Image (cartoon, helix red, strand yellow):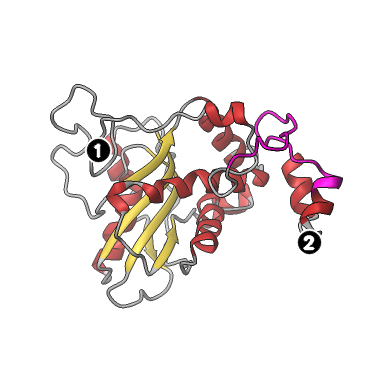
Amino acid sequence: MFGSLRHAVSNLGEGALDLLYPPHCASCGVRVLEGDEGNSSEIEMLCKECRGAILAPPEHRCPVCSHPMEGMLMCSNCDGRRWHLSVIVAACRYEGLVRELIQRFKYGRDQSLTPPLAALLERALDDPRLQGKSFDAIVPVPLHPRREREREFNQSGLLAARLAKRRGIPLLDLLKRTRSTAPQAGFDRAARMKNLEGAFALGMKLPPDASLLLVDDVSTTGSTLDACAALLMEEGASEVCAVTVARG
């Protein structure tokens, strides 16, 4: 609620905005005291306590898909698999506070959570696996039109648009979803991949030899992201990487 009010009057000067609607945490609603905001480019609109509740990715994770690998020599998620993506980087774990925020964002239709979630997403770009890479465009993972009408927005599109603006990278809706698939939750890896066959098509022509950054809110096995990457690579992309807010 507080986030929505602040965005509704964003045309006012910063001083007037803070006077009328003092900053409140988008998660718990407590007032964010002066000096407690942290670096707003790092994570916006969350108080110090809620920022501290966000779980960083596990230290031991797959260098390709970011699957947790504590005590493992080989990634079970990559076993027997040919990736079209170069790497999937998640900013944090899909647990606790982050899980709650993403569910409020997607299913509760709380678009005021776009700024803090996009700021979390931006953290993924600091991952060493993405250092030195430059991208010609940011591409959101699409929703099927029927699901987007029901939800009233594409959560990946909102996150991608904000990330593109912050980083000065073009946003291109290169993909469209042509088939309404069953929700991926509850499927194993093989069923997820089968569920996505023929689900995506190009919505517009790719720039030649483009290096592309896919954006989604959550990755689990990475099947949705890789299905998108497969199509983009077939159509002439030079490389496709992916970032998500969280990994399940």
Residue 190: mark: 1
Task: Judge from the rendering whether residue 76 lies leftward or rightward of residue 14; answer left or right.
Answer: left
Residue at the spot 21% in from the left edge and 50% down from the top edge: 83
Furthest residue in direction right, as rendered = 20
Looking at the image, residue 150 lies above or below residue 239: above
Residue 68's quadrant in the figure? top left
Residue at the spot 31% in from the left edge and 45% down from the top edge: 223
Residue bearing mark 2: 11
Task: Judge from the rendering whether residue 35 lies leftward or rightward of residue 155; answer left or right.
Answer: right
Image quadrant occupied by the N terminus? top right
**Labels 2 and 1: the sequence-earlier one:** 2
Amino acid type of the residue tagged 2 in the rendering: Asn
Amino acid type of the residue tagged 1 in the rendering: Ala
Image quadrant occupied by the C terminus? top left
Whether residue 177 is visible, yes or no, is no
Looking at the image, residue 53 lies above or below residue 195: above
Looking at the image, residue 206 lies above or below residue 84: below
Identify the main secondary structure in magenta.
Answer: loop
Viewer-closest of 212 and 223: 212
Residue 27: mark: none
Of marks 2 and 1, the one in the foreground:
2
Whether residue 3 is visible, yes or no, is yes
Task: Judge from the rendering whether residue 150 lies leftward or rightward of residue 92; answer left or right.
Answer: right
